[in-house]
């Protein structure tokens, strides 16, 4: 049985322009140039403007998109599209004038810290990859036959970004059988692997951390001066510890090591000094970078400078070219206007004008989105700078005030989700280094006097306490809690443990040293 009912709903629909703006807000400066190039590739009506950069930051207030609706029924665009396909004569004169005479101003913002064309592009490192280096060394290795060469290539290809061979030998054998149609034994694979483990840098091809450190110590023993008895003794002791007492070493049971090896504390300390100089990730020491991955550069989105005690904020927009609507598309509209004098437009001409209109609209929307992105970023960072003014003047982490996203949202009048998008993956360059915006946000904690302080301040004091502790008797979480309480910070032991873990600091037993 069919029924008709009337219902009333409240729905919030985002226009394509709003969605585009939200996505642009999340794009960091390092990727903005790529995003703009992608838009220029799909929209020929958008082009890079040639000319001088505006010296003043534009006061931008986004205009309401009154000519747009989700379904297109009520918008002028929707009506025009219907009119274009009517069979009645249609005069495009006024419509063409609107697009020919409307000039779109540039949006480029002030850039104090970067000037000159040479700074516009990021440096790109062109070097051999880590695996290329291993294959080059393979060419200098004396192998018995082609079979060993195939095994060696398979092993090199299986080494991961850290320089480890984490695949089991049996899995390597299966790969060779199914992919290379080569049947090999476990002994043959192991023999070739031993040869690869002598490649540079030392430790390559190890199957776990213990083997990696042992390989590096073996290499050091081969290269050590045979007349330096003290150094040789330390290396041999370190090799013994890594081979036979690895678990005791990782758990820092130093007293047990001294008893079982019948050595002095000075002997153990010399061996530990040799061990801590080893590289647990041998591929990271390769000059070509971290394996096949390109070097990552942090490009600050904002620059804060201190001029005689006054902070100045600038957007780093060096990767955002000044955009405008293409003159070629405006000329096309002018030619259509000239050709339509005294006659009605044909269906083909109407379709062409509609296509040009859509491309110009899209270009204007993108330029407006870039304008609004620049304005939103500037307003948000300016609010953060004012809120954390004392920190940006001194660089002292203890002067960071408790701050949450809602605080900045209240100051700027923006939505909290917008603030979250702006601060995501963004960096600010200061006199004290480049910092991630997310690092300035923290919860509050009350001191004994009732003052509210940032949890970042508590973490800084906690780190100072751990750095200054006696490494022979490191402070437990309970002792750290008591030390913080004497300084006026009343927090629970569980909170201290949470902060310590967030700072990647191990428990007291693992911080023990000689």
Image (spheres, grey):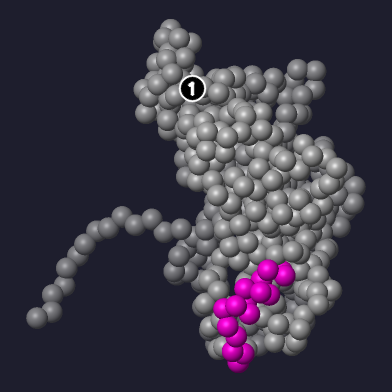
List the single residue furthest toward the front: 262
> Is residue 63 highlighted in magenta?
no
Given residues 160 and 200, the one toward you in this image is 200
In the displayed structure image, the side of residue 107 where residue 72 appears, left or right: left
Given residues 243 and 206, the one toward you in this image is 243
Q: Secondary structure at mark 1?
A: loop
Task: Name which residue lies at 55% across and 89% down.
Answer: 178
Residue 386, x across and y down, in percent = 62, 25
Answer above or below: position of 6 versus 439: below
Residue 34, x across and y down, in percent = 71, 61
Answer above or below: position of 223 versus 348: above
Quarter residue 355 falls in: bottom right
Task: Name which residue lies at 89% across and 52% down.
Answer: 117
Task: Name which residue lies at 13% across and 79% down.
Answer: 2
Task: Name which residue lies at 65% across and 44% down.
Answer: 238
Question: What residue is pinned by disc 1?
Answer: 475
């Amino acid at each position: 049985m069919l029924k008709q009912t009337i219902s009333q709903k409240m729905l919030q629909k985002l226009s394509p322009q709003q969605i585009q703006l939200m996505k642009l807000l999340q794009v960091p400066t390092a990727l903005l140039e790529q995003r703009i190039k992608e838009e220029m590739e799909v929209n020929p009506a958008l082009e890079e403007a040639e000319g001088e950069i505006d010296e003043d930051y534009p006061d931008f207030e986004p205009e309401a998109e009154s000519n747009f609706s989700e379904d297109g029924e009520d918008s002028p665009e929707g009506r025009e599209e219907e009119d274009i396909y009517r069979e009645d004569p249609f005069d495009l004169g006024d419509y063409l004038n609107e697009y020919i005479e409307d000039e779109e101003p540039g949006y480029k913002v002030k850039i104090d810290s970067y000037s000159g064309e040479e700074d516009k592009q990021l440096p790109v490192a062109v070097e051999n990859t880590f695996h290329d280096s291993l294959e080059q060394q393979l060419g200098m290795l004396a192998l018995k036959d082609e079979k060993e060469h195939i095994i060696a290539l398979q092993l090199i290809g299986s080494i991961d970004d850290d320089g480890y061979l984490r695949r089991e030998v049996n899995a390597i054998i299966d790969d060779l059988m199914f992919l290379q149609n080569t049947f090999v034994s476990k002994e043959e694979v192991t023999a070739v692997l031993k040869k690869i483990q002598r490649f540079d840098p030392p430790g390559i091809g190890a199957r776990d951390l213990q083997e990696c450190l042992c390989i590096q110590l073996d290499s050091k023993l081969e290269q050590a001066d045979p007349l330096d008895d003290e150094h040789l003794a330390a290396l041999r002791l370190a090799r013994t510890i890594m081979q036979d007492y690895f678990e005791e070493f990782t758990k820092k049971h130093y007293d047990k090591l001294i008893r079982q090896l019948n050595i002095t504390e000075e002997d153990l300390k010399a061996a530990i000094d040799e061990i801590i100089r080893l590289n647990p990730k041998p591929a990271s020491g390769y000059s070509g970078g971290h394996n096949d991955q390109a070097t990552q550069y942090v490009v600050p989105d904002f620059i804060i400078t201190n001029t005689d005690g006054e902070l100045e904020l600038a957007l780093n927009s060096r990767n955002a070219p000044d955009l405008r609507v293409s003159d070629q598309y405006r000329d096309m509209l002018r030619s259509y206007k000239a050709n339509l004098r005294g006659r009605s437009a044909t269906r083909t001409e109407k379709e062409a004008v509609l296509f040009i209109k859509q491309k110009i609209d899209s270009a204007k929307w993108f330029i407006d989105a870039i304008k609004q992105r620049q304005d939103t970023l500037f307003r948000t960072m300016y609010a953060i700078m004012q809120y954390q003014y004392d920190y940006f003047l001194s660089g002292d982490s203890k002067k960071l005030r408790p701050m949450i996203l809602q605080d900045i949202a209240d100051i700027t009048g923006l939505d909290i989700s917008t603030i979250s998008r702006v601060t995501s993956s963004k960096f600010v360059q200061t006199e004290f280094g480049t910092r991630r915006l997310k690092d300035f946000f923290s919860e509050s904690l009350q001191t004994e006097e009732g003052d509210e302080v940032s949890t970042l301040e508590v973490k800084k004091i906690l780190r100072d306490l751990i750095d200054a502790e006696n490494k022979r008797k490191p402070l437990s979480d309970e002792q750290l809690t008591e030390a913080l309480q004497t300084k006026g910070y009343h927090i629970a032991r569980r909170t201290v443990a949470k902060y310590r873990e967030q700072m990647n600091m191990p428990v007291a037993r693992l911080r023990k040293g000689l």
